[in-house]
């Protein structure tokens, strides 16, 4: 019986050897490996004018970026309710309040008409989430932010490897968690062209000790430095960076496989009337998730049908405004509709072309009887 997992890491001997090499040096804290990983990411993004700061997770990337934008207790931050809980917790970690906004049912992107209604004198920033790698509308967010004097922090956790996205000026947060496009075990990074933000991130990740990043990259310790603001131990260590470097080296293969899988879904499900596809561009984006919308109230039945055929699927995500901690007492109808209709299909590199044939055949068989 087949068993196709919804998500998976894509590790091999390269990562095992990289970890083993670091362990044997006895230097596992933040040092040369992290320095090299940041330089390689810098090259990969193709941005000589921007800075890369590696941190402990995608959540940490968001948390520290929010702090670097001077968002403080009682401030409000607009965010699409339809996202991983991490986006919301990163705001709370700064003592600020995430304000859940509705999304478009077409692409899961934040609905700016709804966001507009939720602006108050306390609103300081907006966090667009590039859901499933869909980012066509991002320009509208920057315009909206400029018109309303808000900072923008992009949650680009679904977008690593998308060339269009790396070209942008802004603050972009990526995740290298166990199942993202590349993984460090756990890790993340911030890409920004704003030097002052990057400098603060580099200190903040190391307990706020000024200049600690630079000295650690030279193999030195900081015995005599000042601290001027709240800092955290949210840096990346050498073991994680070594895993990330091995993953980055094989990213062309990861990209090819994820894009092939997504394109096969797009082609094979295009004419299935029960299914609505997201506007995912499998030529430029590198899909981390592949959600579909199952019409006519058949989502749960399809999920069960696929599970019986050995195919794991997911519901990403439960809207944050439906979670007790973030509930504001108002409904967000589009997000709630999406939540009842959405289904994520396996798209990771261990899913073969044959698997996609099998999955799409099963979906078609279900739909022809539904
Ligand atoms: C994965 C993810 C994050 C958080 O990244 P971690 O590395 O798991 O902390 C944030 N936002 C979204 C949309 C994600 O999918």
Image (cartoon, rainbow, N blue to C red):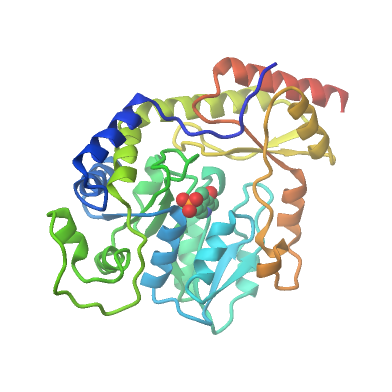
Residue name at image x 55 percent, y 64 percent: 89
In the rendered image, the quadrant that contains the N terminus is top right
Q: Which residue is the extreme one toward the right?
A: 369
Q: Is residue 227 above or below residue 12?
A: below
Q: Is residue 369 visible?
A: yes
Q: Is residue 38 above or below residue 259?
A: below
Residue name at image x 76 percent, y 66 percent: 331
Q: Does residue 85 appear left or right of residue 259 in this picture?
A: right
Along the line of sight, the residue nearer the viewer: 229 or 157: 229
- Give the x, y percent position of residue 319: 68, 57
Along the line of sight, the residue nearer the viewer: 161 or 110: 161
How many numbered badges does the structure rendering display? 0
Q: Is residue 137 visible?
A: no
Along the line of sight, the residue nearer the viewer: 242 or 101: 242
Residue name at image x 87 percent, y 28 percent: 370
Q: Does residue 301 appear left or right of residue 247 in this picture?
A: right
Residue name at image x 20 percent, y 78 percent: 226
- Give the x, y percent position of residue 23: 26, 40
- Give the x, y percent position of residue 240: 34, 44
- Give the x, y percent position of residue 290: 60, 36
Q: Which residue is the extreme one toward the bottom?
A: 121
Q: Quadrant of residue 13?
A: top left
Q: Quadrant of residue 71?
A: bottom left
């Amino acid at each position: 019986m087949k068993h196709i997992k919804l998500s998976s890491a894509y590790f091999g001997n390269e990562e095992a050897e990289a970890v083993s090499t670091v362990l044997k040096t006895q230097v596992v804290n933040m040092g040369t490996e992290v320095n090299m990983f940041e330089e390689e990411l810098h090259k990969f993004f193709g941005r000589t004018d921007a800075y890369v700061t590696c941190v402990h997770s995608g959540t940490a990337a968001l948390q520290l970026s929010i702090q670097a934008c001077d968002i403080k207790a009682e401030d409000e931050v607009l965010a699409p309710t339809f996202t991983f809980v991490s986006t919301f917790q990163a705001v709370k970690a700064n003592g600020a309040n995430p304000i859940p906004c509705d999304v478009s049912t077409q692409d899961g992107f934040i609905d700016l008409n709804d966001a507009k209604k939720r602006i108050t004198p306390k609103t300081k920033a907006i966090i667009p989430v590039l859901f499933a790698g869909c980012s066509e509308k991002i320009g509208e967010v920057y315009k909206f932010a400029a018109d309303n004097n808000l900072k923008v922090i992009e949650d680009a956790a679904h977008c690593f490897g998308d060339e269009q996205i790396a070209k942008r000026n802004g603050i972009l947060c990526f995740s290298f968690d166990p199942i993202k496009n590349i993984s460090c075990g756990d890790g993340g990074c911030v890409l920004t062209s704003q030097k002052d933000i990057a400098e603060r991130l580099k200190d903040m990740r190391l307990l706020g000790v000024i200049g600690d990043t630079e000295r650690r990259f030279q193999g030195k310790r900081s015995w005599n430095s000042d601290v001027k603001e709240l800092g955290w131990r949210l840096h990346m260590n050498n073991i994680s960076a070594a895993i990330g470097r091995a993953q980055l080296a094989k990213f062309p293969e990861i990209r090819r496989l994820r894009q092939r899988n997504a394109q096969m879904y797009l082609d094979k499900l295009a004419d299935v009337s029960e299914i609505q596809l997201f506007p995912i561009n499998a030529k430029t984006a590198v899909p981390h998730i592949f959600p579909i919308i199952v019409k006519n109230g058949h989502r749960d039945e399809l999920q069960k049908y696929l599970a019986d055929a050995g195919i794991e699927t997911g519901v990403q995500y439960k809207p944050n405004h439906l979670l007790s901690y973030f509930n504001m007492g108002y409904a967000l109808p589009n997000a709630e509709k999406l939540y009842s209709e959405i289904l994520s299909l396996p798209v990771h590199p261990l899913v073969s072309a044959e698997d996609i044939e099998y999955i799409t055949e099963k979906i078609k068989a279900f739909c022809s009887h539904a």
